[in-house]
Each structure stands twice: as structure tokens, then as C-alpha cells.
Image (cartoon, helix red, strand yellow):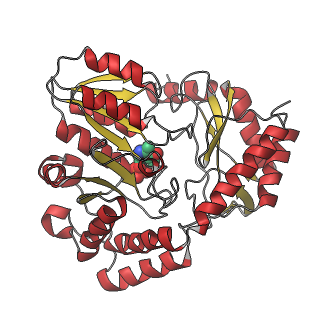
Amino acid sequence: MKTTLQQFLDTQKANHLYRARAVVDSPQAAELLIDGKSYLNFCSNDYLGHANHPKLAEAFINGVRQYGVGSGASHLISGHSRAHHELEEALAAFVGRPRALLFSTGYMANLGVISALLNKGDHVFEDRINHASLLDGGLLSQARLQRYLHADARDLLNKLGASKAQTKLVASDGVFSMDGDLAPVKALASAAQRHNAWLMIDDAHGLGVVGERGRGVLELLSITNAEVPILVGTLGKAFGTFGAFVAGNDDLIETLIQKARSYIYTTALPPAIAVATLASLRLIDDEAWRRDRLRENVRLFRELASQAKIPLSDSETAIQPVILGDVEPTLQVSHGLKQQGILVTAIRPPTVPQGTARLRITMSAEHTSAQITRLIETLHTLGVGQ
Ligand SMILES: *Cc1c(COP(=O)(O)O)cnc(C)c1O
């Protein structure tokens, strides 16, 4: 007799949905070492090459010298170090808001915010392809969760108009994590304001990279703080470290400190991570050339892909998905790339909607044009775009 777990695992395998991990033996970089072999890395979120930047590594080590390794407790007990505190002030200044609050991960930030602000009887509206953590936050809050059509402010407006709830919250990715396109934040804000709803933007893939100064989608689209009262950012992507933050006004942050369970009941990040993240914030301003290089790489990728008739998505960001549709061919191309020494993960349902399996290709400031050319040529020999 097979156990239910064995049955589940067999079904995942039969449907090509079984997930497995690669064991990496090198730092994050344009090339990764896996099982003694070097691979071109086109699937990391380390868009600027901060994750193994010597200045971050040095700051991290200095942080360990000053604070040791573990934080020892949650922020509300004895784990809130001077380094955490300074990072919160620096993050608030970085995004131009009164306050910021550190969370241990972006997943926990989204769970914490939505469940702290909403209760049973309230109403949360989410883009249907929002990151899983925003959707899970909505479920955890016990508010009514309603998804609107992707990037469709008109659909949102209709749904808001039909709601009788006292407290309403609209939540959206800023840059969509699997598609790379931008939320129509201006239109979402106007819909939210018309119906007296909070608007929360999770700019995990925009902060650090999008906008002239790397202040994310809100900078790029000239959005005011009043239009988006709640901004979430993660530190494990462009910033190259770990953790997340929520930025907003004093009342929001103080409410989260009192109520957000994923903030209260968890150990604070290692303080050295905060020290390294402070160094990363400085680099966002001091090494603006990394954003230029990334933009140039994205432009080159799109130009070469379009010449090779590789199907591109409507994205100007570092996330450049090639949507192939069915799971099997997508996996085949991903495996073929791996055999040729190129790492690109196949993203399958339920991470993306049925019928939209894709290669989630991500660009980094660290890629050379030769590496990008090699990716395109290899995709071409594997039959993509023919
Ligand atoms: C990665 C991601 C998160 C989760 O952040 P972690 O710090 O990795 O937990 C949240 N939201 C979005 C949009 C993301 O892409």
C-alpha cells in the first residue's frame, strides 16, 4: 500500500510538477558552481551583483565582529540592536517616508501587514497574479479575499464599488515577480482613494533597480506617499542581503509593532545582516552604474531575442520571462539549457497560471554581452523561437 504522501509525490512526478533543488557551491554571481560544473546563472534575483559584493562582505564581517552572529531574541524582547535601528532609519530615508519596520522575510512582512490591518468582515482586493505571500496574507487575515484581473484598475474599481466592508485594502506587486511588468499604480491609487481603501505595494523587484535612483516603481511612475500609504520592500533581491521592511507613517508602523504576529513572534535578523544592508543602501547611490549596466543588459537581451524570434513578454525590467505555455516543453528547454551549462528555471503552475509555464530569465548587472549572446544562441539551438 502506498501512503498518501507517496501517492502525492508520484502524481507530482507524473505531471512534471516535482520540484528539486540544485546544490550550489559558490557565491551568487553570473556563474555558479554546481556538482563541480560551472553554470551561467540567468535565474537569480541578485540583479545588481550585491550578494557577493566585497563591500557588503566586509560590512557583514565587521557586523559579526561587533554584534556576534545571532540576534538572540525577537525585536520586542532583546533582539533589536542599534544596527537594526539604524537600518530602519536609513530605509525610511531611502524611500522618503517617516518610518520603516524590519521583518525577517518578505513573506512574513506581507503576512504581518495584511493580518494586522484586516479582520473578519473586512475586504482585501489583490491582483490575481500577486506573489503568494500577499495572497496568503489575505487568507490569513480572514478578511474576504477577492482577486481582480491582472493589472486591471477598472475591474478593481468595480469590485471596490460593490463592497460594503468598512475596512478595505488593495494589495499588488509593484513589479510582478514572474512577469516583470509593472502594476498600474496611479490607476490603482485613484481607485483605492475613491473607495477609501488602503493601497499596499510590494516592490520586491523594483526597489534598488527601477527608477533613476533605484527607489522603485513609485519613483518611476511619480507616485506620492499619500497615494500608496503602505510600501513593502525585500532585502534578499537587488539589495543582496536578507530580510524585508514595511515603510509608511508613524501610526502604521506603531500598529504593526503592536499587532503583526509575524513581527512579534519571531527572532530578529542577525544584526550583521543589518550592517551589510546599510552598506548595500549606500552602494545603490554610489554605484548607479550597476543600474545602467542592468538596463543595457536588458536592452541587449531583448534586441537579440527579438532577432532570434524568441517570444518576449511585455517587460522592461530585469525579469524577462519567455512563456512557452505547456509544462513539458518548458522543462525540456530548461534541461537542455542546463546540459549546455546555462541555468534558467522552468516556472510551472501553481506558481504561474495553468497554460503559462515559462522560463523565468533574469538579467543582472554582472552579465557580459558574451554571456547574453550565448544564452540567446543556446535557446535558438534548442528550438525556442522557431
Ligand atoms: C520574493 C518576494 C517576496 C518574499 O520575500 P522574501 O524575503 O524572499 O521572503 C515577497 N513579495 C514579492 C513580490 C517577492 O517577489
Q: 4 and 37: which one is in front?
A: 37
Residue at 48%, 59% in the rendered image: 214
Q: 207 and 359: which one is in front?
A: 207
Q: On the rendered structure, is 12 left or right of 64?
A: right
Q: Which quarter of the rendering shows the C terminus?
A: top right
Q: Residue 83: x, y in percent?
A: 28, 75
Q: Quadrant of residue 304?
A: top right
Q: Residue 102: x, y in percent?
A: 28, 59
Residue 326 appears in the figure: yes
Q: 283 and 141: which one is in front?
A: 283
* Vertical comparison of 214 with 64: above or below: above
Q: 307 and 241: which one is in front?
A: 307
Q: On the rendered structure, is 151 left or right of 316?
A: left
Residue 364 appears in the figure: no
Q: On the rendered structure, is 216 left or right of 78?
A: right
Residue at 14%, 54% in the rendered image: 254
Q: Residue 148: x, y in percent?
A: 40, 22
Q: On the rendered structure, is 105 left or right of 115?
A: right
* Vertical comparison of 65 with 368: above or below: below
